[in-house]
Each structure stands twice: as structure tokens, then as C-alpha cells.
Image (cartoon, coloured by chain):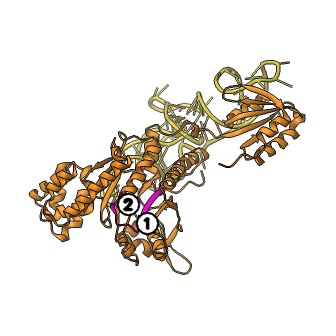
Amino acid sequence: MAFQGVKGTRDFYPDVMRLRNWISDAWRRVSLRNGFEEYDSPIFEYLDLFTAKSGQEIAEQLFSLTDRGGRNLAIRPEITPALARMVNARINALPRPIKWFSVPRLCRAENPQKGRLREFFQWNIDIIGSDDVLADAECVFVAVDFLREVGLSPTEVQVRIGSRPLTVAALRGCGVGDDAIDKALAVLDKRAKISDQEFLDAARKIGMDDAQVQAIMRFQDCAGVAELRRAVAGAEGAGEACDKLERLMACLQAMGAGDYCTLDLRVVRGLAYYTGVVYEVFDTGQDLRAIAGGGRYDNLLAVLGGPQVGATGFGMGDVVLGILLEERGKLPETLKAASLDVFVIDDRPELAELVFQTVGALRRAGRAADFSYKRQNVGKQLKEANKRGARQAVIIKSADLVALKDLATGEQAEMSMTEFQEKYCSLVPKP
RNA sequence: GUGGAUGUAGCUCAGUUGGCAGAGCAUCGGGUUGUGGUCUCGAGGGUCGCGGGUUCAAAUCCCGUCAUCCACCCCA
């Protein structure tokens, strides 16, 4: 083969494209019914936009380029900075809360492996302009609403919810110094993936003593808010963080998403900019990496030159999700074949002209109609109709007689051409 | 960047000790004398990832290289 696709990218042949559309249609449907509006941003931005948020080291993971005017650009690895840029530009004109969603195509120059590619799609749900934990609850609800929509049950997936400020308060409470907090968070974030011994070793490496590690593990293992309150009693800011977490869980319960959600203080999230509640969606089989992740990021707009405005949201990639849906058999059968409303067939080659007329009329009326390029016997044409995934076949028997055949049941009814046209070639009403 | 595995038809894979390149599915064409899906016959399709070496002879053995997958690092 002379050329192949670039490492970490996918070709979307029609059968795969149907799957991609099925997922993104569900993302849009769920977003809209939860009151979110769609936006999009350019596929490349100034490099600075991305490095400002996440630091210089992130530049290695970017596909960057220099344009002919010498500008340093990069293909977007996430859409949140662009969202912040767009919102900042109209922050005084946009009614709040700003509830926006997007399904951007993103690129990251990472090493491809299971569930991670260099080009992918990511559903983003964000609420900007509210400090209320209700906004966090609503984002989590949207994620749950989607999971339920595609047939994933609470026994198959769970949203694990933690809190950055509470974790920070717990760390301070057991004597971890300010300078070590970020490093400690990074170690805590790994805990779910490593053994207790490895965790202990990693914690020692950044200067935590055994008593501190034991204390923080007790904190992370708390199963309910009441237990948490006791574990962090007295730590600065802990009370407020507990209140918020409690309210969040209560809201989710009230909205009917409680069975999908678990309190889990082991969820910390990798990067530094989260300022409140954080959460990740996992499959309960634990085989895959996180399906989605998000949380509150109240400083991002300010970091990008805007005002201090509360923001919260999550992202869900198509790659891990696709693997999970496939493994759990959640993809609908009908996705596997192309679909067509009607296939028009002639009884004799002389009727070809009527086939073209009929196909034209059906299509103008809004129906998906097709026909064979070859004038051959009825059996062959039906075979083609079947292969094309048509629901019905119209067999034109003469200028005034047609037979309408249901290809699933085999039932067939004859009618006059006039009756057929009245029934099937008048405009299909728009939903 | 590091480690492991795998590269044979569009796909999934056989290929014995080195001895003519194979199957199923898919595609295309024909048949069942003209109403399909499951039947039947046939055809096309391969630089055996690529380059070198050993050999009378390499898909097979050796060296190199590239690609893919899996894991580590990282994960917005």
C-alpha cells in the first residue's frame, strides 16, 4: 500500500461513521434536553492559549505549527481554553448561567494505546457563571442522563465524586506543607491504580511520613459525608467543602441520578486547575480508563485574562466510550446495515422510465429512495433492495399498477399508481 | 522516550522439516425460466510489511528497518 493513515488516527468508513453519528447524536440529544446550547471553536489556536492554562510542559503533547506569518499555532488538544476565550470576549453580554456544549474533534501527540488515540472526539458540557453547587450537580446529571440513554446501567458504570478543596484541607490537616500539596495530589490521584505498598513508597518519596499517609488513606476511604466530617474536623475550609459535597449528593438523589453516583475521595484528577468538586466516570469492570472526567475550575477564565467567574464541566471522549459500548453490546443492531425507505423496481425493462419518475417523486417527498442501475429481472432487483437495507420495495407492474412489498415480512399489496403517489409521494410532514 | 507481542487477499486467519500462495467471510458475475433474504456454480483479488543476507530453493532461517497493537511515562 502506497499510503497509510497517520499513527493514532482512524478512517471512518460508512459502517463506522454510522456508529460515530449514533454516539454524537445521543450527545447532542441529551445536551439539548438538559438546556445546553451548542458552540464550536476553530480547530487551531495560538499556542499560548493552551500553554497559558496548563503550562509549558504540555507543549510536548501538542501538534503545533508555525504559519507563514511566523505565528505559533497549535491544533486544539481540548476545547475548554477556547470556550473560556469565547466567553471572556462576551462575558458582559451573555446571560448567565451560560450552559454550553460542544463535540469537538481534538488532537494530542500522545502514544496511542487502548482507549487513547491521537485524534478523537470529545463531548464537552460546561456551565459558566455560577458558583452554586447546583451547577456541578447539573453537569453530573447530564453525564448520567447520557449513560442511561445509551443503555448503561448503574451496575455497569459509576460516577465517582471527590472534592479538591476537601482533599487539600485533609492534607493540610495532617501536616502536609503548602509546597508539597500539588505533588501530594498527584500521588493521591494514582492511588486507585497502584497497590498500597506502591502508594506508601510514592508518598514517602515526596516527604510524607507514615502517620500522614495513614491519615490521608483513612480520609480517602470515607464512605459518606458524615464520616468525612469527622475525618477532617477542624481543618480549614473543610466544613464548607463538606456542605457542598452533601448538597451535591442530595441534588443528584433528588434528580434521580443517585444510583449512578458514589462518593469517592480517591478521585483527585490530574491537572492543577480544578478548584472544587471533581469526578470521573468509570466502568465497574475497571478494565478501561475513565470514560469521562470533570469538575469545577473557577480560576480558568481569570487565568486567561477574564474576570473571576465560576465554571464547571466535564469531557467525555468517544474512544473509551466506543470500546465500552461495544464490549457491553449496547450498540443497536440497526446500526450494522445501511437503511433506505424504499427501493423501486421495474417488472419489465420497458418500465424503466416510470422507475426514474417514481424515485424522483419519492425523494422530492422526503423519502430515502433508490433503484438499480441495471435493468434485470425482479428477483435480482429484490436481492439488491435487500442488500441495500431497504424497508420496502415498490414493484412497478405497469403505468397504472404497482405492488408495495414489505421486505421484512414479505407481505405485498397491489394498488394503482395514483393511489401510491397520493400515499407515498406527497410531502412527508416535518416533525 | 522505554519494554513486550504481532505483521500472509478488503476482513478473520491457516500455511508441517525451507520445496508451485490457501480457506472462510466480503466483492463481482452466472444459475435455480424471472418476487429477495438462508441455496448453488464461478471469477477477480497477495512485492507473504519493507530492505539485505544464507541457500539449488525463503512466507518459513539470520540481520536490519518500518508499521500496528499492548503496557510503562503522561493523561487537559
Residue A122 among magenta residues: yes
Question: Residue B46: x and y, percent?
Answer: 62, 42
Query: What is the chain letter for disc 1?
Result: A
Q: Which chain is yellow?
A: B
Task: Give left or right: position of A36 versus A234.
Answer: right
Q: Which residue is mark 1?
A: A97
Question: Taking the image as drawn, is residue A24 in sight?
Answer: yes
Viewer-closest of A11 and A331: A331
Question: Taking the image as drawn, is residue A114 in sight?
Answer: no
N-terminal label among 2 and 1: 1
Question: Disc 2 vs disc 1: Cβ atoms closer than 8 Å?
Answer: yes
Viewer-closest of A32 and A329: A32
Query: What is the chain letter for disc 2?
Result: A
Q: Which chain is orange?
A: A
Q: Which residues are magenta?
A: A110-136
Residue sitting at the far front = A254
Q: CA distance from mark 2 to mark 1?
A: 9 Å
* Amino acid identity at mark 1: Pro
Q: Does A49 sit above or below residue B38?
A: below
Answer with the quarter of the image where residue A404 lies: top right
Answer with the quarter of the image where residue A341 lies: top right
